[in-house]
Amino acid sequence: MNEMYDVVVVGLGPAGSVLSKILAENGLKVLALERKVHPRVKPCAGCISQRIDQIFDLSALDVVEGSIYGATLSYLGKEPVTQYSTKTLAYMVRRERFDQKLMQEAESAGAEIVQNVPVKRVTRDNGLIEVHSAAGTVRAPMVAGADGSLSVVRRCLMPNNEWWQYATLERRIDNGDVALSIRDRVHIDLGWVTFGYGWIFPHANAVSAGLAVLLEKKRTLRKCFSAFLRTMGLESTASQSNEKTLAHPIVSFARSRPTVAVPGAILLGDAAGLTDPLTGEGIYFAVYSAQLAATAILDVFRGKPDALSQYERRMDEEFYSEFRQAAWATRWIYRFPKYFVHKVRRNPEIMDVFFRILRGEESYRRVSSELKRHFLRRIWFWRR
């Protein structure tokens, strides 16, 4: 590991690996640091919306375990509503394989990969960025923070952002029967927590089951998760499994336009709060933001003075403005979950709007207007 690079990328999830590959392919000297060792266990359902096809060739990685065509929505496991689409909605991957494949592609492109090296802090010195890790200190004109929800780069260089923070519990459960029964759909269950949802996503001979809640609303999350597994018929299988229940924080910049770029530093992926506040999806946004970040960094090296401000503008246009609309929908759906399930049962077009979002055909602006039209004007009568 040398002391001087063009760019230091911190974190080798999807965002960091895709960014490292693009920058290396364009001739930059790239160092990518990962605090763990791939393949590593990642608490993530591994669901990627079909709109990924518009920006990335997922099929080339050979990591897709299955395709999703429908969804089941329920309240506390009762009276489920299932709806299918004629088109693919999402793809299921194992994060261990997916992330490792992306890292290998970055390395093949020429990026220097160093694993098992946690970054401790990031500082400035004489116009350069210094990245301090257990392996020593390296310097570069640019650092890219792709180091997840608890980003060290963000905390050191862009600490004044506001976000929604979620706590999640997730467990992989080896249950071929359940996986087969929902092999082409996901199950979303509302009502277990006051501002969140439970999920069951299919994998090959297993399912990913989890629960997510806004941190400020957190109430005995593990007890709720146990009740969720029991109601869904997964508790006995889970107790016999060697898999651990994994906890993980998620942040979403859904309140205002955040700072994600300053001279010498840029944020992307989870570090930039790119998690859909309603669905919890993050992989699509990680890959897309990596492509935008690569363009911005290359423009910096080409001498374009507005490269970073343009990056922030694109991030707001593509992601944060949508997240603010999604946050509005999130508040009402999670505040009245039982009524929302009732509305979806009586109005299938609501679910279809979400399907179109997953395919990249629609925006949350349409969702918000649909909810205002179908939902708010009748909520008072329902609560009576």
Image (tube, helix red, strand yellow):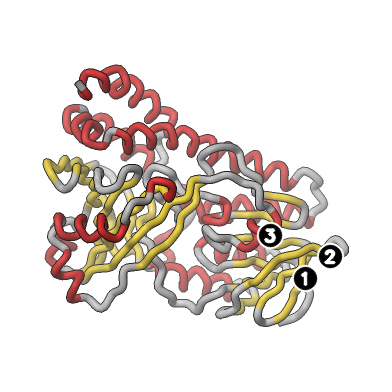
- Between marks 2 and 3, how big is the CA–CA gap? 13 Å
* First-in-chain label (2 vs 3): 2
Q: Quadrant of residue 352?
A: top left
* Residue at figure coordinates x 49%, y 51% from the top left: 251
Q: Earlier in the sequence, mark 3 or mark 1?
A: 1
Q: SS for tag 2?
A: strand
Residue 60 vertical position relative to residue 328 in the rendered view, above or below:
below
Q: Nearer the viewer, mark 2 or mark 3?
A: 3
Q: Mark 3 = which residue?
A: 156
Please provide percent x and percent y for residue 122: 71, 65
Q: Is residue 134 above or below residue 204?
A: below
> Which amino acid type corresponds to the residue marked 2 in the rendered image?
Asp
Mark 3 or mark 1, whichever is nearer to me: 3
| Amino acid type, label 3 | Cys
Residue 213 x/y as whole percent:
36, 50
Residue 242 horizontal side relative to residue 358, left or right: left
- Please give the residue where the numbered disc 2 appears in the rendered image: 125
Disc 2 crowd rating (10 Å Cα; few below 14, some 14-19, many 20+) is: few
Q: In the rendered view, would you say 98 is above or below 375?
A: below
Q: Dividing the image into 4 quarters, which one contains the N terminus?
A: bottom right
Q: CA distance from mark 3 to mark 1?
A: 15 Å
